[in-house]
Amino acid sequence: MDTKILLENGTNELEVLEFQLDGNAYGINVAKIKEIIPYQKVTPVPNSHPSIEGIFMPRDTMITAIDLKNCLQRGMSKEGGLFIVTNFNKLDIAFHVDQVMGIHRVSWGQIIKPGATVSSAEEGISTGIVKIDERLIIILDFEKIVTDINPETGLKVSEIDAMGDRTRSDVPILIAEDSILLNRLIVDSLKKAGYSNLIHTCDGQEAWDTICEFKEKGTLKEHVQCVITDIEMPLMDGHRLTKLIKSDSATENIPVIIFSSLVNEEMKKKGEALGANAQLSKPEIGNLVRIVDSLVRK
């Protein structure tokens, strides 16, 4: 399956792969997918998490297979179906699903944030819901699913503690991150690293509206001197946010750091074309602080 998205940079679009489990429709951003392969037998791993089916090694690459049905508390998957093989946060992981229905090109503006009845704050594993042909597709938070199974794959906040005592800084930094948990962890990590003047927003649209509000008041420099943004966010993604910032003469000199689980070679090219000053993968919270240090000093 060809998963290279030929979308113009910064258009606020994505492609969603729709798949099914027990007849229910779910989605994943195509940018996370390496390939889709028929189910194959896996080698069980002793004492592993109940949602881990085992490991297998196609083409000399070891891949962990996760029973997505088990993650969603819908029982255990049987042999058969498909593996959606993904790569994000520098991990190769296969998710076991019943069947794949197709790919839909949508705007991030079409994706609705799940309400409190669907997911409760940090506990939810849905990043959004999109309506296609009168059908609701729940887009799952695969990063959270993996982090819940193995917390070591998430943000390594211990990297901040290892930096020791640091000079305090009141340089204003704006953060755009839709995950409540990750937003809090990034804010906490930056505060530990000495950055106290932080604004956190829950998507690219809110971040851009905030920037525009300060720009209109003539107080932009006092409130935003660096932007840290995720890529995948409802309403407006990080690539569109980067494009808007770098296309406006009033904001083009603000450093933009893309901090996302999707930072691979293809995505790096997109970010560079849009003018991002730095890009790195989400587990690297220590490197994020070092990059912020270097950019705000300039």
Image (cartoon, helix red, strand yellow):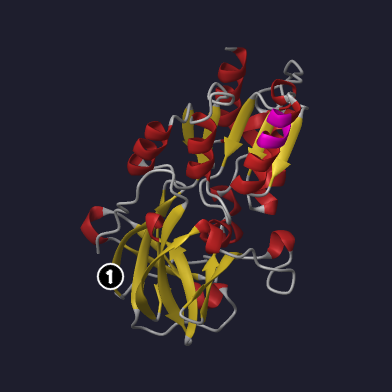
Q: Could you tell me which secondary element the residue under label 1 belongs to?
A: strand
Relative to residue 37, is residue 136 drawn left or right? right
Q: Position of residue 288 (x, y in %)?
A: 57, 30
Residue shown at 52%/65% (left/top)? Answer: 48
Res 162 seen here: yes
Image position of 68 with respect to 227: above or below? below
Q: Position of residue 108 (x, y in %)?
A: 52, 57
Q: Could you tell me what secondary structure mostly forms the magenta stretch?
A: helix
Image position of 227 with respect to 18: above or below? above
* Residue sitting nearer the eye, 286 or 162: 286
Instruction: Give, as a three-letter code, the residue at label 1.
Output: Ile
Residue shown at 67%/42% (left/top)? Answer: 209
Give the position of the C terminus as an image quadrant. top right
The residue stretch that appears in magenta: 212-216
Q: Dot 1, how many residues are within 10 Å of its Cα: few (below 14), some (14-19), or many (20+)? A: some
Q: Position of residue 191 (x, y in %)?
A: 75, 31
Image position of 296 with respect to 264: above or below? above
Q: Position of residue 146 (x, y in %)?
A: 53, 59
Residue shown at 42%/46% (left/top)? Answer: 90
* Residue sitting nearer the eye, 216 or 243: 216
Q: Which residue is mark 1?
A: 37
Give the position of the N terminus as an image quadrant. bottom left
Residue shown at 59%/35% (left/top)? Answer: 228
Give yes or no for residue 213 being in the magenta stretch.
Answer: yes
Res 92 seen here: no
